[in-house]
Amino acid sequence: MPDLLIELFSEEIPARMQAKAAADLQKLVTDGLVEAGLTYAGAAAFHTPRRLALSVSGLTSESPDTREERKGPKVGAPDQAIDGFLRGAGVSRDDLEVRDDKKGQVYFAVIAKKGRKADVIIAEVLEAAIRNFPWPKSMRWGTGALRWARPLHSILCILAGEAGTEVVPLDVDGIIAGNTTRGHRFMGPDAFAVSGFDDYEAKLKRAYVVLRADERAEAIWHEATNQAFAQGLEVVEDKGLLAEVAGLVEWPVVLLGEIGADYLNLPPEVLQTSMKEHQKFFSVRNQKSGRIEKFVTIANIETADQGATILAGNQKVLAARLADAKFFWENDLRVAKDGMKSWLQSLEKVTFHNKLGSQAARIERIAALARDIAPSVGADADLAAQAARVAKADLSSEMVYEFPELQGLMGRYYSEMAGLDASVAAACEEHYSPLGPTDDVPTAPVSVTVALADKIDLLTGFWAIDEKPTGSKDPFALRRAALGVIRLLLENGIRLPFVTVMAEGFAAHGRVAVDEDDDSVTGMIADLLAFFHDRLKVFLKDKGIRHDVIDACLAMPANDDLTLLVNRARALQAFLKTDDGENLLQGFKRANNILTQAEDKDGVEYSYGANVKFAEDDAEKALFAALDKADETIAPAMAAEDFATAMTAMAVLRAPIDAFFDTVQVNAESSIVRRNRLNLLSRIRTICLGVADLTVIDG
């Protein structure tokens, strides 16, 4: 079985496109080969800035002969139907066979196809892949019609087997496939031939091209950290930047450079962001001081002066960039030391949303909400309101205008410079968090308060103007905001009267409840709470809590207290995992079913009046005693929200309930005894439903 090697050699492909392009090439080609009847043992794709490569091993040398039978229209069907069938099957009328069928005679077409050689199939599949390649952006060049991310120079396409290596005949817009490739743009030799993948990879390396992206990245990181360590420094880890620079070079050369002394006192995050965004440099940090003192740049060429000229040029460009950053920083500090007044005033002219007013108006809403939420979080209300008012002031700063990703962080620096309380400064940075399911959650009370107020204002605002997420569309990241609220509450153990807080949020947006229909604030609160419950279900499902357990707890009162709800759900899930819990559930369901059927039949509700004096059986009397004893424990435990204790007490009921059903006939001949026993079952239902709605539990 031969091995296939493909290389598409072009001008430099943007780093962000390379990995997906390699994966797309593998999928397009392998899917096409399989669809055409070829099989293979394995495939792997590779990418460098100038090439996409694909190796397919163990490819069959030709496709098998095939024979297919297709049932067509009835004999005597209109010519139009028969002609359509002939076109679809690719046969003529003379090729049709007439066969007997259940409903009479019908036409059959027998389509026999001879197998084809692998090289013919490969040529078709590869040409189709090249012409229909799914680049996010592509270009044409010269006078041809072919499109590629950058001008395509050559195609290598060979089959290597026991008989040797053959070139797959292929011509795509004048680019004729061959068995040659090129090495490094500057250090490599002219075109050279290859005989297979191993030969290809080895010769590329001798021609100063590292084919594998992960090998380039590993070499970069290893050399960068070694050079930094030799000077008592460390490279700031950045996996995204590492992947990007590995896609910018074919032969990585690591160079350690100096940052001008004038810029070393800039905040480390400013240096790191500026160097990463503008120059693709890694930051090198002094572990003791935390300062960024040097940088690592990755060249694509070895030079006689060991990169001195490259470093000098990079340092000159970097100095210009950092001079801008220093100018922004110094200007911003002057405004910060004046209390950030001008920034706050300028936010009055910044529109947050055309239906939700300015940023300044939003800040006032957040401050009011923060003051209301603070007691539940245990935060100082004045500090929370102050933090809310300055948390977004840095949006008007020059530094954040230049580097939007620094918003919040710069707010912390500026608040510290303004002499504000440390908790206020921390809230400026932390109130955006958490940004996702794995992001760190703030724990400082003022930060948590402002983060909650920010997200709740966002949600109530967009609910008020009916801009809710639909399907996969969520342009204002409201699902992320809701998950952020959930994580802030749960991971900090906060008990928040959520309906009240949402009502305050809607009131701040000028929405006042006047009735109970769906257009009222009451309807919007219910809808938004349901949205939170949906996000909570997703969150808890990822934590391993069953959907029916969540539903059983959502059906209980105070389901707007998300922390209480989750505590109940965790206790219920743990309870149901025990044998006593599972068996009690079955006993409850049996009692509930008998009771429900009797109530439907009799047209009355059996919910009061069970009396032990009418008990005739020992098991019946034992159940009365067990329910009395359980009630003494469960009622105070539920009042104290001690769900574990309540459910442990419920578990004790398993044995007397089982014994009751084993020995007692509920529908006794005596109407008094029957009614008493049904009321006894009602006590079981009432006690169990007081903990959670067990009727929705599966099983």
Image (cartoon, grey):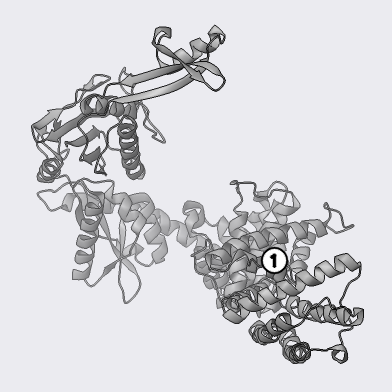
Is residue 302 toward the left or the right of residue 595 in the image?
A: left
The residue closer to the viewer here, 217 or 265, is 217
From the image, tell me which residue sits under label 1. 696
Q: Is residue 187 left or right of residue 513?
A: left
Q: How many marks are shown on the rendered structure?
A: 1
Q: Quadrant of residue 555?
A: bottom right
Question: In the image, is residue 144 above or below residue 358?
Answer: above
Q: Quadrant of residue 359?
A: bottom right
* Quadrant, the C terminus: bottom right
* Residue at figure coordinates x 68%, y 50% from the top left: 468
> Which quarter of the rendered picture does the N terminus lie within?
top left
Percent across and percent down for residue 156 are 19, 31
| Residue 311 or residue 458, whichever sits in front | 458
Residue 688 position, x and y percent, is: 73, 78
Q: Can residue 227 be seen in the rendering of this structure?
A: yes
- What residue appears at the point 23 percent right and 73 percent down from the top-left corner? 232
Identify the element where label 1 is drawn: helix
The amino acid type of the residue labelled 1 equals Val
Q: Residues within 10 Å of mark 1 (few under 14, many from 20)?
A: some
In-image side of 480 versus 665 (left or right): left
Q: Is residue 312 in view from this perspective? A: no
**Place of residue 110 in the rendered image (x, y in percent of width and height, measured from the top left):** 38, 19
Residue 432 point in image, percent of width and height:
56, 63
Task: Give the side of residue 500 with respect to residue 34, left or right.
Answer: right
